[in-house]
Image (spheres, grey):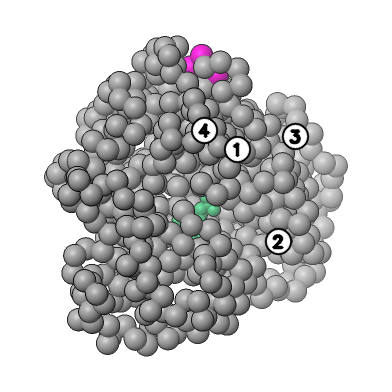
Amino acid sequence: MNIRTVSTTPFDDQKPGTSGLRKSVEVFQQPHYLENFIQAIFDALEGCEGQTIVLGGDGRYYNRQAIQIILKMAAANGIGRVLVGQGGIMSTPAASCIIRQYKAFGGIILSASHNPGGPDGDFGVKYNVTNGGPAPEKVTSAIYDRTKEIDSYKILETDDVNLDKLTVMRLGEMGVEVIDPVEPYARLMESLFDFDSIRQLVRQDFQMCIDSMHAVTGPYAKNLFEKRLGAPQGTVQNSEPLEDFGGGHPDPNLVYAHDLVEIMFGDDAPDFGAASDGDGDRNMILGNNFFVTPSDSLAVLTANAKLVPGYKDGLSGVARSMPTSAAVDRVAEKLGVECYETPTGWKFFGNLLDADRATLCGEESFGTGSNHVREKDGLWAVLFWLNILAATGKSVEDLVRDHWKTYGRNYYSRHDYEEVDKERANELFERLQGMLDDLKGNTYGNYTVDYADNFSYNDPVDGSVSKNQGIRIGFTDGSRIIFRLSGTGTKGATLRLYLESYEPDASKHDTETQTALEPLIEIAQKIAQIREYTQRDEPTVIT
Ligand code: VG1
Ligand code: CO
């Protein structure tokens, strides 16, 4: 066995962001770049020798090459066994499911999620820990610290592994198993949802359209919806995973999932539509000519969880990221369960789920999930919705409208200013930070500032503190304006502006969202001078 130790020097930009290390393919292809980061992971993980790890990615460009490098490095670093997805492909929720089922030590997931792929696109590496969830901050910090001092990495000199055949083999002294990741995931889904009643719904006069956006969920969605649930062939569109996602932007929102949006907002639209992102952890839910905001989706799932076999015994609690609307808070209150507010990023839900303080979690960024795995899970959310539709016989729109009647409507939108100048974006934040103390009590039209702060999270389970998680300006009527800088973008800076206002009166639930939020949009501009700092007249993407 020939293990080579290669000398290297640190890169100064390997700090993991909201969801792993995410850079352009070009950056990852620099000599030693990927290797340094992978070695830093192995170095930072105590006791990984002899253990099992899971490996797979969303199938984007550079996935296959990276898998081969990581396998050889794992063998050289004394890993006991690697479970790798067939073709090197595994959705993020499936990887989480497999880490848990096989009781693996952890997993390496190659994905830049919703970022575009291809030679000119992005690539990414995430490390997930034993509970199947994204590494918490103390682990990502240890990995980052290691990247700053790394001077060599180890790699086995050997031939590439055939990733396409399901096999069990050895690479040096390490075991390699190429596994089918769809089957264990699909079985987990069958254990949670009432497949019989969804099958009946799908066989009736009910039409649906699932868009995999040429990303990782294609094979999973075909297996679940067409094979197991009996929906007609072609129900899943764009189902073949492609290295460049067919040139698209695999982000399931009204802007990027345009194929699906055209169908669902066209004449004779199907009853139900859904899309998922590059690595399969996000979802967008649509009804016939109707869009469900992710924040409302979380609230509706929570309110109806008892109708779903996997959750019929009730929820221990719920959690949402800070910028996610407070729609779910009202449901939690009615159910008499705790509602936690965490920073953006799924890693912050891990402790709450492990400690059984929360059962369902969600983010405004089209992410919903539960304690069945430790990642957000796109197809799980789709099945949850179908299960509720089957159990209630209602349409998507009626379900949401009835929900608003009971709980009131949280008008909600996110405005993204992508690829703006980094320094100017930082200046905008510094200026805002400096204003916070003086904002309280200020009045803008009908709105009076109740509080203004930079969100800090005290994890109730392990006591860790995460500061500077976004600037919040809350008004006395419960409305909120939030500013954050993205931790997943790879070009310049992305400013995210989150807007929320609450309307209890059902006769006022038909206003167009942007119109309803107009006063808050103006206040945000007035306070933060967004146009001046970003040099943009309007946001790049509105969701
Ligand atoms: C974004 C979203 C966040 C999500 C993260 C990873 O982060 O806002 O809610 O958890 O992406 O999602 P940021 O820092 O760019 O706002 V994914 O589907 O990339 O794993
Ligand atoms: Co994703």
Q: Is residue 138 magenta?
A: no
Alpha carbon separation for disc pair 4 and 3: 41 Å
Q: Identify the mark nearer the N-term, 4 or 3.
A: 3
Alpha carbon separation for disc pair 1 and 3: 32 Å
Q: Quadrant of residue 56?
A: top right
Q: Quadrant of residue 359?
A: top left
What is the magenta range?
226-230
Type of amino acid at the residue the image marks with label 1: Asp
Mark 1, secondary structure of its residue: helix
Type of amino acid at the residue the image marks with label 3: Leu
Camera-side residue of 82 and 455: 455
Q: From the image, tell me which residue sits under label 3.
A: 163
Q: Nearer the viewer, mark 1 or mark 3?
A: 1
Alpha carbon separation for disc pair 4 and 1: 11 Å
Mark 4, secondary structure of its residue: loop
Type of amino acid at the residue the image marks with label 2: Ser
Q: From the image, tell me which residue sits under label 4.
A: 266
Q: From the image, tell me which residue sits under label 2.
A: 24
Residue 300 in view here:
yes
Residue 172: image location, x then y, percent: 77, 42
Mark 2, secondary structure of its residue: strand
Question: Residue 259, labelled with which disc?
Answer: 1
Q: Quadrant of residue 522?
A: bottom left
Residue at (60, 17) in percent of width and height: 233
Position above or below: 189 against 198: below
Position above or below: 258 against 512: above
